[in-house]
Image (cartoon, rainbow, N blue to C red):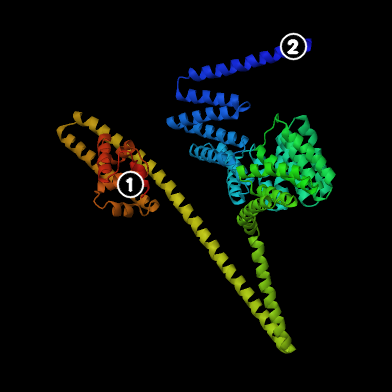
């Protein structure tokens, strides 16, 4: 009695705490100051309802999405769209989930959210794989895998390899499937991710089953049940038991098949699965399709029809074409066995329609054709070679032995000559290529030397000019104290120093500049033929990324004059204010 009372009080407290939490979340929404805070509050409310009421959770998500779009909160819009996609997956509505995952994927791409973009691209691949759209699925997986490998998204890679394995399994490329499952398992182990590591093992067991290694497959499946029972992963258990049931069904052991089918159905009915791995409908429809077939084989028509109806409806709602025509086929056979001709014809028509849709897609054919194209071409080539040899052999039998020997010797001689000729040509080409490389390397070294020499000379000239400028300043300072006749002589000396040093400096500079920047003057003249000699000088100095102060020191012009010259030059070259003058000249 005390234990019951304690449990009752505990449930009341838990209920009150949950209500308080909901009220707090609603209060946070009402108190939100900005649109971003409002979106965050709506997301929190949707998460609170996620495990309780998916419809309410979706309602809050749509409110958050509308507000995000209104305010152009692109990152939040992407997050909400992805959450809506997951909401529809949990409600087994894959077509709607695709719409929102696609929207989230594009938004994450536009906002440079690379990891989320890669993840949502993978999820789009998962949905297309579930719907047997193999070409689309492969395209999404390859996009996601390229991004994940390039950016080293370790958390994403094992999931991608596992899903790629499932794709290859579907197109019956079991070697590549095994390879990808093994990669996924190794990466999950490396990351200490036990919950996810069981899924590649499940898939490896599935491959063993497909390849007829039934004992290995059953052992592999049943080794996984302990983990899933411990963690109450009922959906995964349902898949495992159903897979074992299918093996026994294919071997005609109906009692064993029914035994494991019952365990699969019981696990499927459990609502407290703590590890959601995708749409429950995908797992459920596989169990229902198998149940329909098992009960049909046991001639339990009512049970077979019941599960076939469930499987067909769920398949039609989610575009599971393969499961749809399997369930429709069982229904057609059941009603035919019960002599209900109209119903049998009705479901046989559904079966043929879905079967035709499934076959007409040709996804498997296209994928395997792409993969085996090289092998196919090689086979054709080998057949052509074999045909040539057969024809040659037929003709050679009609020839005399001496003719065959002469022809053989002649062919060998030609081949030998051609071989040595080609070898000689290759040697000459290699020699020419080596010479070109040496010449190129020598030219690069010469140019590098000239560039260094130009910089060195430029620094020397700057120092020299500063020295000359210093002498000029000293003469200018002496001038006021000199006699009248000496003043004229001093001024004459100053003028000659400036003129001669400036001209000699420019001539020496220009000589070395042309050695390094050979075509600069030609390109400058072609683009702007109306430039004055002084403007061309300024352009050359700027091409070397010289500052106005350095140009002033070399040319003996004031800093103000150089800045004015640069302003006029920019105007004459028709360069916008935002464009860099030095960058423009460097681009010529």
Number of numbered tags placed on the structure image: 2
Disc nearer the start of the sequence (1/2): 2
Secondary structure beneath label 1? helix
Q: What residue sits 81% from the left and 38% below the top? A: 223
Q: Callout 2: 10 Å neighbours few (<14), some, many (20+)?
A: few
Residue assigned mark 1? 540
The nearer-to-camera label among 1 and 2 is 2
Query: Which residue is located at x 48 percent, y 19 percent?
Result: 32
Left or right: where 89 falls relative to 499: right
Which type of secondary structure does the marked residue at label 2 adopt? Answer: helix
Asked whether residue 278 is in view, the answer is no
Residue 100 locus on image (x, y percent): 53, 38
- Find residue 6 and name its label: 2
Rendered location of residue 19, percent (x, y): 60, 16
Disc number for residue 286:
none
In this rendered view, identify the residue nearer to me: 357 or 30. 357
């Amino acid at each position: 009695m005390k234990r019951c009372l304690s449990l009752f009080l505990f449930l009341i407290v838990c209920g009150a705490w949950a209500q308080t939490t909901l009220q707090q979340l609603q209060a946070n929404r009402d108190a939100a100051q900005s649109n971003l805070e409002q979106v965050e509050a709506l997301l929190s409310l949707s998460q609170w309802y996620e495990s309780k009421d998916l419809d309410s959770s979706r309602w809050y998500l749509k409110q958050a999405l509308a507000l995000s779009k209104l305010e152009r909160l692109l990152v939040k819009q992407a997050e909400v769209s992805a959450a809506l996609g997951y909401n529809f997956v949990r409600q087994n509505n894959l077509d709607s989930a695709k719409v929102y995952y696609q929207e989230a994927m594009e938004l994450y791409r536009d906002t440079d959210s690379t990891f989320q973009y890669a993840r949502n691209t993978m999820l789009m691949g998962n949905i297309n794989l579930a719907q047997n759209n193999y070409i689309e699925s492969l395209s999404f997986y390859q996009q996601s895998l390229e991004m994940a490998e390039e950016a080293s998204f370790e958390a994403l890679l094992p999931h991608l390899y596992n899903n790629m394995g499932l794709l290859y399994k579907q197109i019956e490329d079991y070697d590549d499937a095994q390879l990808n499952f093994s990669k996924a398992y190794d990466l999950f182990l490396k990351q200490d991710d036990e919950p996810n590591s069981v899924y590649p093992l499940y898939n490896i067991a599935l491959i063993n089953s497909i390849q007829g290694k039934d004992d290995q497959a059953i052992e592999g499946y049943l080794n996984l049940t302990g983990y899933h029972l411990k963690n109450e992963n009922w959906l995964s258990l349902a898949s495992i038991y159903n897979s074992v049931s299918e093996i026994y069904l294919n071997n005609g052991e109906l009692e064993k098949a029914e035994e494991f089918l019952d365990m699969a159905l019981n696990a499927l009915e459990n609502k407290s699965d703590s590890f959601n791995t995708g749409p429950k409908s995908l797992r459920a429809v596989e169990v229902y399709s198998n149940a329909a077939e098992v009960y049909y084989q046991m001639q339990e028509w009512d049970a077979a029809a019941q599960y076939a109806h469930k499987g067909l409806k769920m398949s039609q709602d989610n575009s599971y074409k393969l499961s749809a025509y399997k369930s429709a086929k069982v229904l057609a056979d059941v009603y035919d066995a019960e002599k209900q001709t109209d119903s049998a014809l009705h479901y046989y028509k559904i079966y043929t329609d879905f079967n035709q849709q499934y076959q007409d897609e040709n996804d498997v054919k296209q994928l395997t054709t792409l993969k085996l194209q090289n092998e196919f071409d090689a086979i054709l080539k080998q057949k052509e070679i074999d045909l040539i040899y057969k024809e040659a052999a037929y003709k050679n039998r009609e020839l005399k032995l001496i003719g065959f020997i002469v022809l053989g010797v002649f062919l060998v001689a030609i081949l030998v000559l051609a071989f040595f000729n080609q070898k000689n040509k290759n040697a000459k080409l290699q020699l020419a290529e080596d010479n070109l490389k040496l010449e190129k390397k020598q030219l690069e070294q010469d140019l590098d030397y000239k560039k260094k020499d130009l910089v060195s000379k430029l620094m020397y000239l700057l120092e020299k000019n500063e020295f000359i400028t210093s002498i000029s300043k000293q003469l200018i300072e002496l001038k006021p104290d000199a006699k009248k006749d000496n003043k004229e002589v001093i001024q004459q000396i100053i003028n000659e120093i400036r003129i001669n040093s400036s001209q000699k400096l420019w001539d020496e500079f220009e000589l070395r500049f042309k050695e390094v920047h050979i075509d600069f003057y030609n390109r400058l003249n072609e683009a702007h033929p109306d430039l004055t000699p002084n403007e061309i000088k300024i352009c050359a100095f700027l091409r070397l990324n010289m500052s106005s102060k350095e140009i002033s020191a070399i040319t003996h012009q004031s800093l103000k004059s150089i800045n004015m010259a640069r302003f006029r030059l920019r105007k004459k070259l028709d360069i916008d204010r935002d464009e860099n003058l030095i960058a423009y000249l460097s681009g010529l």
